[in-house]
Amino acid sequence: MRPRPDDIFVCAFPKSGTTWIQHIVHQLLAMGYVSPMIEGPDAASVEAMESPRILKSHLTYADIPKGGGAKYIYVCRNPKDCLTSFYHHHRTWEHYEFEHGDFDVFFDLFMDGRISFGDYFDHLNSWLESIEKQEENILFLKYEDMLVDLPSAVVQISNFLEGKAAEIVKDEKKLDKIIEASSLASMKMNQNRWFSNIYFQPIHRDKFIRKGGSRDWKNHFSLEQSERMDERFRQRLTASAAGGWWKKEMAWEGGQNENAGEPRMAML
Ligand code: PPS
């Protein structure tokens, strides 16, 4: 496919908040819910879409179609919650044939990168390169920051998109409406809207926006698994911009599923 100057790519390792960003971008551009995953349909149907196109992808930075002035929003989430969310995703969607799958089995598959879209750390490291290169057309966001301060994230995205999107948030009422519609509670409603033209059938469509928040991994990981992930994090990310991230979210000490439910509404 050929990127266009007004294309907006929403990119992430699976289960990092892709749908959340898509939903916010849709509203900022006052567009419907159509932002196909480019790995899904054939190039011709993506080519046939009218501009501006909002396109979802789980590809690495190396593999994502680049050029033409397109914009890219990358969202990442700590690997422990990402793994946990992806485990539930595998149990929910029929095509994985993992409905009764075991967490320990999935943990090892994730650690070995033997899952769709491969190794979490390869993926994140590939996109972190864009920070080092100071690429101007890439906005880098963390899922956990959005949990804490959703309004700032919405404004950040709108400023990055410029034009109509940047204008819309100047209207306080419209901004409030977008924030409210992007809360976990709002997005949990009517979950079929995300799947209007989907080609795979999930077993339970209403479980896609599942629980939200961080530290749900504490309900699943053993201490040994937690330490294995911490060690992998040290090996793969210490030298990167992400080296100091997610200390609280990934610590063994602390509760389960903190920040679940509604994000705090910080003052703008
Ligand atoms: S996918 O299948 O890769 O596109 O999934 P993705 O959209 O990247 O990630 C799904 C997880 O994001 C959570 N989510 C949210 N959390 C907080 N607030 C809002 N508004 C929100 N919208 C989506 C969703 O619940 C999935 O996480 P888990 O931990 O499984 O609940």
Image: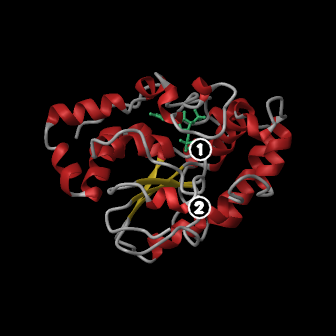
Label 2 – label 1 distance at C-alpha: 13 Å
- The secondary structure type at the circle numbered 2 is loop
The amino acid on which the numbered mark 1 sits, given as a three-letter code, is Lys
Q: Residue at x 13, y 38 (%)?
A: 171
Residue 199 rendering spot, x and y as whole percentages: 62, 41
Q: Going from the N terminus, do you reach mark 2 or mark 1 first?
A: 1
Image disc number at residue 59: 2
Q: Residue at x 40, y 40 (%)?
A: 23
Q: Is residue 260 in view from this perspective?
A: no
Residue 210 falls in image quadrant? top right
Task: Between residue 184 and residue 264, name the one nearer to us.
Answer: 184
Residue 122 rendering spot, x and y as whole percentages: 66, 65
Residue 161 falls in image quadrant? bottom left
Residue at far bottom of view: 133
Mark 1 vs ligand 1: CB below 8 Å: yes
Q: How many neighbours does mark 1 have within 10 angstroms: few (below 14), some (14-19), or many (20 or more)?
A: many
* Rendered view: 196 above or below 165: above
Would you name the residue on which mark 1 appears?
A: 15
Q: Is residue 182 in view from this perspective?
A: yes
Task: Between residue 18 and residue 120, name the one nearer to us.
Answer: 18
Residue 71 rendering spot, x and y as whole percentages: 37, 64
| Quadrant of image for the C terminus | top left
Q: Residue at x 79, y 55 (%)?
A: 114
**Disc 2 + disc 1, Cβ < 8 Å:** no
The amino acid on which the numbered mark 2 sits, given as a three-letter code, is Leu
- The secondary structure type at the circle numbered 1 is loop
Task: Between residue 241 and residue 47, name the one nearer to us.
Answer: 47
- In front of the other: label 2 or label 1? 2
Q: How many neighbours does mark 2 have within 10 angstroms: few (below 14), some (14-19), or many (20 or more)?
A: many
Residue 251 rendering spot, x and y as whole percentages: 63, 43
Looking at the image, in which quadrant does ligand 1 appear?
top right
